[in-house]
Image: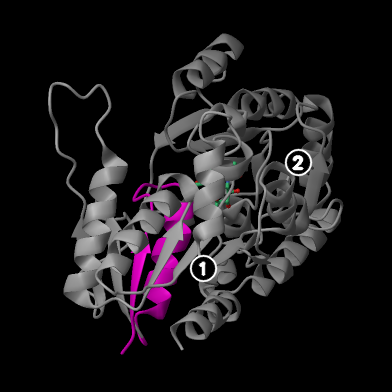
Amino acid sequence: MNKIGIICHPTFGGSGIVASELGKGLACKYEIHFISYEKPVRIDVNEPNIFFHKVTVPMYPLFEYPPYELALTARIVEVVKEQNLDLLHVHYAIPHAYAAVNAQQILSINNITIPIVTTLHGTDITLVGKSPFVLSSVNYAINQSTLVTCVSEDLKQQTLKYFDLKKDIKVIPNFIKIDKSNISKRRKNHNKTFVHISNFRPVKRTLDVIKIFNNIQKKIKSELIMIGDGPDLEKTKGLVNSYGLNKSVYFVGKSKDIESFLRTADLFLLPSEFESFGLVALEAMSFGVPVITTNSGGIAELVVNAHNGYTCMVGDIDNMSLKAYDLISNSKLYSKFSANALVTAKKYDINKIIPLYEACYLDLIN
Ligand code: GMT
């Protein structure tokens, strides 16, 4: 049985979720070894063939910043040697690709060769990666990776625009496990229910979510469920207060059970500055929930305007409010969009996408 090392951020972010679900999906055929500073939220080490190796960062009063990359590099070297890993798959270039490439160099001194697949997820390119403070290191790490994948055609184009790449990038989109009961178990609320899920970073434009909802609730009795936590949470709650919407907007924090919220949702609001793919939108669509979003980034490859949702200009609150209201108040149109959303989601079924990663692995291992 081949052994794959997966390096990812362990948190609720999309790249960590993709890495975890990929590992779980492959564990019937491969030994999967996750390497990170915490156990990724969605994995269970009691499941067969799933292992977790913790990275411990040394602390010393001299360090203003703990040397995570150094500790990660050393841990990768150790795990590859101890477990005889066949391949490393790193998710989110920063700092994972750089650490993996250095680990590969160290291992080569011991005559151990190991291929690296680097999957680019979004802000590792579009926001943080292209910053002049890290650009040359990220450029180097991507070029040194044996194979590079990214999650949308748009992200591929962004990467080619900002980086000097010497290799091709393979597009492998995000995926979803479609549970046949998603639709049959849908619960209907008396009020119209809007849902937003994110890590409340500025790129998610959570204030826009509240502004859109404020416009809609003036015309139709509705509620908004805000799921997640992050830097803009307090500002967003402040706006809800100032609009006097406390009785119709619910902040539920991080949740391991987003399915139960998506089952009651009528519309999903994601007015991001950009999304390289928009995994949460795909999750909503797998419950037949249409999406109101922006036309910025790879999300427009998933949400097709006037088909399974609407894509509007970033910050165009009036248009997003209007489109959301038109859809929610026209049951015939809504049913069509909802059915289209589900059909689209099925194209990204886990069983269709995981073999694409597996084919990459087998090419490199063999
Ligand atoms: O880039 C980020 O914001 C972080 C990353 C994450 O870990 O949540 O999200 C990105 O990766 C997801 C999984 O591939 C994509 O579905 C998200 O669209 C993407 N986020 C952005 O591009 C803002």
**For the point 76% across and 41% down, which residue is it?**
296
Taking depth in this image into account, of 190 and 30 the one nearest to the observer is: 30
Amino acid type of the residue that numbered disc 1 sits on in the rendered structure: Thr
Q: Which mark is residue 296?
A: 2
Vertical relation: 129 (above or below) 8: above
Q: Quadrant of the N terminus?
A: bottom left
- Where residue 247 sits in the image (x, y, percent)? 51, 24
Q: Residue furthest top?
A: 242
Callout 2: 10 Å neighbours few (<14), some, many (20+)? some
**For the point 76% across and 57% down, which residue is it?**
301
Which element carries disc 1, helix, strand or loop? loop
Residue 299 placement, left or right of 64: right
Vertical relation: 114 (above or below) 74: below
- Where residue 130 sits in the image (x, y, percent)? 61, 36
Q: Tell which tag, 2 or 1, sits nearer the viewer.
A: 1
Q: Which residues are magenta?
A: 1-29
Q: Which mark is residue 8?
A: none
Amino acid type of the residue that numbered disc 2 sits on in the rendered structure: Ser
Tell me: is circle 2 under 8 Å from ligand 1: no
**For the point 68% across and 65% down, which residue is it?**
168
- Distance from label 2 to label 1 (Cα)? 29 Å
Res 14 visible: no
- Where residue 337 sits in the image (x, y, percent)? 79, 58
**For the point 83% across and 39% down, which residue is it?**
323
Vertical relation: 348 (above or below) 189: below
Q: Which residue is mark 1?
A: 146
Tell me: is circle 1 under 8 Å from ligand 1: no
Taking depth in this image into account, of 295 and 308 the one nearest to the observer is: 295
